[in-house]
Structures are given as C-alpha cells and as structure tokens.
C-alpha cells in the first residue's frame, strides 16, 4: 500500500514546478519587511533608507491632522466597518467622504470602495456588457484589464497613447457592438507620462462612446487644483454624462480604498451591480476619516503638490544631463531605463547599499528590454536629498 504522506507530497508537486518556473525565469517576487520613520524614510535590516518607492506622494500619511482625524474615528467607530456597505457597514463618515469627493471633483455623485483595485473590477464589470466593445490602452493598470476581462465584452488594446490606432480599431469594429468604451489611466504608473485626454474625450463624443479614466496616480498631485484630469477638462455640458473617473485613496490621499465619480444614475447602477462593492466589507471608518482629512488639506493648500512638481522637474532634468534614459516621463514618476533586467537589479542593489530604496521594475510589468529603476518623488523629499541621490547614482553607475 502507498504511504499516504508521500501521496500528499506528490499532490503538491505541480505547485513546486510552477514556483521553479517563476524562479528560473528570474521573476520570483519577494517582500521586504520594513519599519516606517516619521520623516518618510524606512528602516530595513537596521539600516535607514531614503524611500523612492512610495506613492504617499504628499507625505500625508504622517500629517498630524490626518493622524488625529483617523484616531478620532477609531475612538468613535472602532477599527473595522463590520459588514458590507449594503448590510450595516456604511456610516455617516462614508457618506460624507462620498459627498466631499463628488463636490471636489465636480461630479454629481461618488462611491467609495474598500480598494482601488476593487473599484476598477467592480465598476467596469457592472457597466460594460458582454455585447460591448472596449478599447483599452496597452499600458493600463492590471486592475483595469482584469475588470475588462470580467465584463466579458470584446477587448481590444490600442498602442500606448496612439489615438490613430484607437480610431482604426474603432472604425473597423464599431458597428458590431452595443456600446463603445474607451479606457485609460490618466497618468501611467510605469513611465510617468500623461494620457492624451483631450483627444480621447473628442473621440468619445464623436462616437457616442463612454470614457473611463483611472486617476490613481494623478489625484492630489496633478493639475492647478490638484484633482487630476478634472482640472484640465473642457467644461462643456456633455462631459459628466460621458466620463467616469476612478481613483484611489491609497496614494496621495494617504489612506486606503478606491472611489468612482460619475453621473448620479451611473453611480446608482454601480451600487446595485458591482460585486466587489456588494460582497465586500465596507472601508474601515479609520481609512475614511484619514482620506477626508487629506482632501481637506489638499483643498486648503497646494504647496506640497507644487514642491513635488518642482522636485520631480529638477530630478528629470539632472538625469537627462547625465545622459540617462527617463523614457517619456512628465511627472513625479520617473523611470531610469537600463534595458537589461540583471543590470537593473544590480544597480538597485548597489543603491540600496548606499541608503536608497529605488525599486527595479522588470518584465512582465514592463516590456522586454525596458527594465528600469522607478523613482517616485514625494513631499518627504528635498533638493538636498535629491542632490545626494544624484551623486551616489553617478558613483554607482561608474562601476557598471
Ligand atoms: C493605475 C492604478 N489603478 C488602480 C490601482 C489600485 O489601487 P489600490 O492600491 O487602491 O488598490 C493602482 C495601484 O497601484 C494603480 O496604479
């Protein structure tokens, strides 16, 4: 008779096989367990590091007003929401946050999800029908792509930011489908470049389509009023019926969760159909309070956004002067592209030894031969700190 123990080991062999494949391709993922410091730096293996890998762009996670507000909510409401929003997890804090987001963004209404990823999955699969056509930028975030797949609509990718390619796909296929949806990040997270929003909107209008924009990396850090694309949008009457804006509370808003802004009827349909909303516990009141506080701070004072903008412009211009390839970056997200994955890993490791956490990004997160370091600028940084980084980077690169 076979030993039951050896049977159970064999039963999991396929998992080891998959792990080996990932490892052998040099794509094994790992996590660092870090300590966060009040000045935005981090401690890793007892060493203090400058953090260039955070999306806490406005450094609000450590702001006394944000912390006090979260603490107050913790005392009044407790740590968790305890149920989905449609059961008993929805509080007056949640409603206030939704009203404040809608008003800030200039939309009729908003809905808050317990993550940005969940918002994208829920919104897209609730609104888009299997008989629809989706045209999706090829560099959109994974949560958008997964939302598209969940919808079971026909999904076509247009070349990154290429509106001619988008129009060609549209002309070829438009007549065969119920509705047309155009989906794009507004600020792309791997290259730090902006979508051609004005042109996407004109194509949307001309073709009786809907435009879904994901503003995860732009909210709080882009535009005169720090709202993202909303600040630059043509204020014609039609746009609120045509545009759906997705965002996250987890980056510049220093909390956790996601949101969608749209016309009131669209929000009502999402509330009734989005499975990641209906079947998931509501966002913790603590996160709700932190996000409300961050929005209030952004509306009151744009100095942190202005600082992030100018630090990013300074770093981009110095990297270009050093002859480095920063791709099409126009923002606080700055890739330094080396191409070769192994070389990129080694440079990242050398910078870590010098006190800088700059994450290496490799395929499949980016196309083959475009491995890069990705620098994210936040309001924790300063000109002195960036000058120090540039010196160390020169020193490290001279060894390669
Ligand atoms: C463009 C984009 N959309 C959505 C998300 C998901 O947001 P969250 O982290 O709140 O789940 C991310 C996260 O990195 C993102 O970069």
Image (cartoon, grey):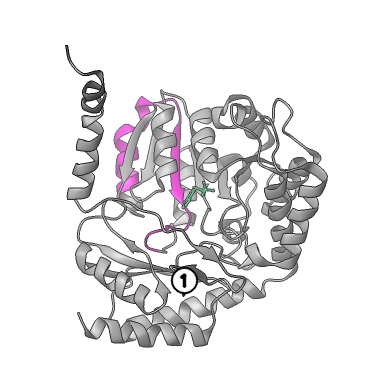
Q: Is residue 186 magenta?
A: yes
The residue stretch that appears in magenta:
165-191
Q: Which residue is depicted at the point 62% across and 64% down?
A: 226
Q: Residue furthest top?
A: 1
Tag 1 residue: 46
Q: Determine whether 369 is above or below 94 in the image.
A: below
Q: Is residue 350 left or right of residue 399?
A: right
Label 1 crowd (10 A; few <14 / some 14-19 / many >=20): few
Among the 4 quarters of the image, the one containing residue 261: top right
Q: Determine whether 312 is above or below 6 in the image.
A: below
Badge 1 residue CB within 8 Å of ligand 1: no
Among the 4 quarters of the image, the one containing residue 149: top left
Q: Which residue is depicted at the point 32% across and 51% down?
A: 29
In the image, 233 versus 286, the foreground residue is 286
* Position in image of residue 81 (x %, y %): 70, 37
Q: Is residue 204 left or right of residue 82?
A: left
Res. 230 visible in picture: yes
């Amino acid at each position: 008779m076979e030993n039951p123990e050896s049977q159970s080991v064999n039963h999991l062999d396929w998992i080891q096989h998959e792990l080996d494949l990932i490892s052998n391709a040099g794509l094994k993922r790992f996590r660092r367990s870090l300590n966060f410091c009040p000045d935005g730096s981090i401690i890793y293996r007892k060493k203090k590091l400058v953090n260039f890998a955070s999306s806490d762009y406005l450094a609000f996670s450590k702001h006394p007003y944000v912390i006090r507000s979260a603490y107050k909510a913790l005392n009044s409401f407790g740590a968790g929401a305890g149920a989905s929003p449609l059961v008993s997890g929805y509080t007056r804090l949640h409603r206030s946050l939704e009203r404040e987001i809608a008003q800030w963004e200039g939309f009729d209404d908003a809905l808050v999800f317990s993550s940005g990823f969940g918002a994208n999955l829920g919104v897209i699969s609730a609104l888009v029908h299997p008989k629809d056509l989706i045209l999706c930028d090829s560099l959109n975030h994974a949560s958008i792509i997964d939302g598209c797949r969940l919808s079971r609509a026909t999904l076509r990718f247009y070349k990154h930011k290429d509106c001619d390619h988008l129009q060609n796909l549209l002309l070829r296929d438009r007549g065969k489908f119920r509705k047309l949806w155009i989906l794009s990040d507004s600020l792309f997270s791997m290259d730090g470049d902006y979508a051609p929003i004005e042109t996407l909107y004109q194509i949307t209008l001309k073709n009786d389509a809907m435009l879904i924009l994901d503003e995860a990396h732009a909210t709080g850090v882009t535009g005169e009023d720090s709202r993202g694309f909303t600040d630059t949008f043509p204020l014609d009457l039609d746009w609120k019926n045509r545009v759906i804006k997705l965002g996250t509370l987890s980056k510049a808003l220093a909390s956790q969760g996601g949101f969608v802004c749209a016309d009131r009827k669209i929000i009502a349909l999402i509330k009734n159909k989005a499975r990641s909303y209906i079947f998931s516990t509501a966002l913790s009141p603590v996160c709700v309070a932190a996000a409300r506080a961050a929005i209030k701070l952004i509306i009151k004072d744009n100095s942190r956004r202005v600082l992030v903008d100018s630090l990013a412009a300074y770093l981009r211009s110095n990297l270009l002067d050093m002859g480095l390839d920063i791709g099409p970056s126009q923002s606080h997200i700055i890739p330094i592209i080396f191409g070769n994955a192994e070389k990129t890993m080694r440079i990242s490791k050398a910078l870590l030894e010098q006190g800088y956490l700059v994450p290496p990004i490799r395929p499949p997160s980016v196309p083959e031969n475009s491995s890069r370091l990705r620098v994210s600028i936040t309001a924790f940084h300063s000109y002195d700190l960036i000058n120090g980084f540039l010196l160390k980077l020169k020193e490290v690169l001279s060894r390669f």
